Image: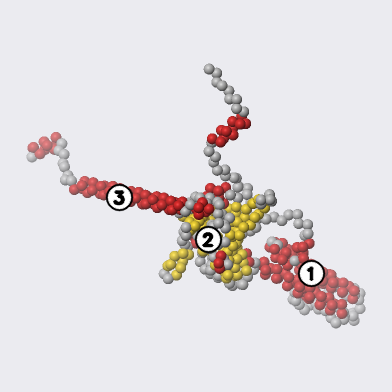
C-alpha cells in the first residue's frame, strides 16, 4: 500500500509542529554588549564629532588637568622653554638696539645688560631672571629704561606661568579619584531574602583608616527602554532607593557594609525572576560619594553590575569578628558568598503568593535535615566499621599460638 503524501503545505506544517514542542528560554548573546560603567569606575563613553573644539580652550586649566600625564609634562616643559626663548629674544633686541653687540662700540658707553654679547648669553640671562637664580655675572643697568620694562614684564609672565603649571601639577596629584582607589566593591551582587522580602545587596569597604565623611550611596539601573510612543531610549537611568533612604542614603563607612535595596513595587527589578534576570539587558550602577577626612576633597567611587554578575540565591559571608577586645575585618572573604534558600520567582509573584516563600523555606529545612541525617548515618557507619576493625585486631592478638608438627619433628620427639 502506497504511503499517502501530506497535502498540508510545508509553511503551515512547520508552525504546527513547533507549537507542540515546548519552548525553551532564549538566552541572548551578551558577549559584545558594552557596559556603561566599567568595574574600575571609568565611564565607557566616547565623544565624537564635536564641532566646537574651542570650548575646551575657554577653560584651559580644567583641560590641562584632564589631560594625561605625558601630555601635561610636555606642555609644562614647552611652556617654560618658549617663555625663556621669547624673553631671550627680547633681551637680545634690547642689547642690539643699544649697540651692546657691536664689537667696535666706544669703551665709555655702559651696556644695558652687562656681559650679554650674543643670543646664548641673552638666553642664559632670561633663565636667570625668570627663575630668580641670579649668578651675578649679568645684570641690567639704569642706562636703559627699556630693559627695566622687559624685566618687569618677564617677572609678571613668569609668575603667571609658575602659578598655572604648578597648580595644574598639584591638582593632578590630588584628584578625587586617587582616594577612590582604596574604596572597594564586591565583585558580584547578590539577591536573597531578607526580612521576608527579596533584596538586591552589594558590599562596600574602605581600606584606609582615614574615614570618608558624609558618605552616600546611590544606585541606578541603566537599560534600553522604549516608550509607548515608540521612542527608543538607549541609556535610561532609573534611580533605586536603598534601605537608608530616610537618612538621605548617608552611611557610616567605618567597616565594610552591605548596601541593601528592597525589591518592592517601585523597584525596576520588581518583575524580574531568576530566569528573566539572566536574559535581561540591564546594568546596576553604584556610586559612592563622600569627603576625604584628611584633605577635605570630595571623592567619588563607581562600579557596575551586569546580569551575569548578579548571583540569585546567595548571601555574603560575615567578615567582621571580635578578637581580644577589637573588631577585626578579614578582607580575604570580602566577596565570598554562600547559597541560601531563595524563591526563583519575581518579587511581584512573591507578593501575590506569599506561600511560595514558606514552601521554599520548608523545602530548604527538609533538605537540611536530610543532609544532617545522612551525615550522622555516615558517621555512625564509619564508627561501627572502625569498632569492628578494632575488635578483629584485638581478637587476633588474644588467640593462643598453635604449633604445627611435621613428620620429622614427630620422629625426633619419639626418639627423645
Q: Which of the two discs, 3 and 2, labels the residue nearer the N terminus?
A: 2
SS type, badge 2 = strand
Q: Is residue 74 left or right of residue 14?
A: right
Q: Quadrant of residue 99?
A: bottom right
Residue 92 locus on image (x, y percent): 85, 72
Q: Residue at x 55, y 43 (%)?
A: 25
Q: Residues within 10 Å of mark 2 (few under 14, many from 20)?
A: some
Q: Residues within 10 Å of mark 1 (few under 14, many from 20)?
A: some
Depth-wise, is mark 3 or mark 1 nearer the camera?
3
Q: CA distance from mark 3 to mark 2?
A: 43 Å
Residue 228 locus on image (x, y percent): 66, 51
Q: Which residue was labeled with disc 1?
A: 83
Residue 191 marker: none
Q: Which residue was labeled with disc 2?
A: 260
Q: Is residue 107 above or below residue 23?
A: below
Q: Is residue 230 left or right of residue 318?
A: right
Residue 221 locus on image (x, y percent): 60, 56
Amino acid at each position: 500500500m502506497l504511503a499517502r503524501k501530506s497535502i498540508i503545505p510545508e509553511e503551515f506544517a512547520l508552525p504546527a509542529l513547533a507549537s507542540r514542542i515546548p519552548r525553551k528560554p532564549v538566552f541572548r548573546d551578551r558577549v559584545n554588549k558594552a557596559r556603561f560603567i566599567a568595574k574600575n569606575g571609568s565611564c565607557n563613553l566616547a565623544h565624537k564629532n564635536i564641532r566646537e573644539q574651542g570650548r575646551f580652550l575657554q577653560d584651559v586649566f580644567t583641560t590641562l588637568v584632564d589631560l594625561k600625564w605625558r601630555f601635561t609634562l610636555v606642555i609644562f616643559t614647552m611652556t617654560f622653554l618658549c617663555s625663556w626663548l621669547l624673553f631671550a629674544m627680547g633681551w637680545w633686541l634690547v642689547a642690539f638696539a643699544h649697540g651692546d653687540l657691536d664689537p667696535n662700540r666706544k669703551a665709555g658707553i655702559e651696556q644695558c645688560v652687562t656681559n650679554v654679547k650674543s643670543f646664548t648669553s641673552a638666553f642664559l640671562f632670561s633663565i636667570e631672571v625668570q627663575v630668580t637664580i641670579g649668578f651675578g655675572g649679568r645684570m641690567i643697568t639704569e642706562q636703559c629704561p627699556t630693559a627695566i620694562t622687559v624685566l618687569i614684564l618677564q617677572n609678571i609672565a613668569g609668575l603667571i606661568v609658575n602659578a598655572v603649571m604648578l597648580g595644574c601639577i598639584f591638582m593632578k596629584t590630588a584628584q578625587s579619584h586617587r582616594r577612590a582607589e582604596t574604596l572597594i566593591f564586591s565583585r558580584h551582587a547578590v539577591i536573597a531574602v531578607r526580612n521576608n522580602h527579596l533584596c538586591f545587596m552589594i558590599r562596600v569597604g574602605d581600606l584606609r583608616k582615614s574615614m570618608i565623611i558624609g558618605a552616600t550611596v546611590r544606585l541606578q539601573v541603566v537599560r534600553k527602554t522604549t516608550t509607548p510612543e515608540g521612542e527608543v531610549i538607549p541609556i535610561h537611568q532609573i534611580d533605586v532607593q536603598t534601605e537608608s533612604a530616610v537618612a538621605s542614603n548617608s552611611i557610616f563607612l567605618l567597616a565594610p557594609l552591605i548596601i541593601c535595596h528592597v525589591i518592592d513595587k517601585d523597584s525596576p527589578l520588581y518583575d524580574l525572576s531568576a530566569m528573566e534576570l539572566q536574559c535581561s539587558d540591564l546594568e546596576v550602577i553604584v556610586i559612592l560619594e563622600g569627603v576625604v577626612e584628611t584633605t577635605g576633597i570630595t571623592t567619588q567611587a563607581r562600579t557596575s553590575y551586569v546580569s551575569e554578575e548578579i548571583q540569585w540565591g546567595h548571601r555574603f559571608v560575615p567578615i567582621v569578628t571580635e578578637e581580644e577586645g577589637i573588631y577585626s575585618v578579614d578582607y580575604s572573604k570580602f566577596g565570598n558568598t554562600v547559597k541560601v534558600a531563595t524563591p526563583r520567582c519575581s518579587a511581584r509573584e512573591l507578593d501575590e503568593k506569599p506561600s511560595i516563600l514558606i514552601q521554599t523555606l520548608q523545602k530548604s529545612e527538609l533538605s537540611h535535615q536530610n543532609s544532617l541525617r545522612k551525615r550522622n548515618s555516615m558517621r555512625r557507619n564509619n564508627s561501627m566499621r572502625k569498632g569492628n576493625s578494632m575488635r578483629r585486631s584485638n581478637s587476633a592478638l588474644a588467640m593462643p599460638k598453635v604449633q604445627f608438627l611435621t613428620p620429622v619433628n614427630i620422629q625426633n620427639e619419639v626418639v627423645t
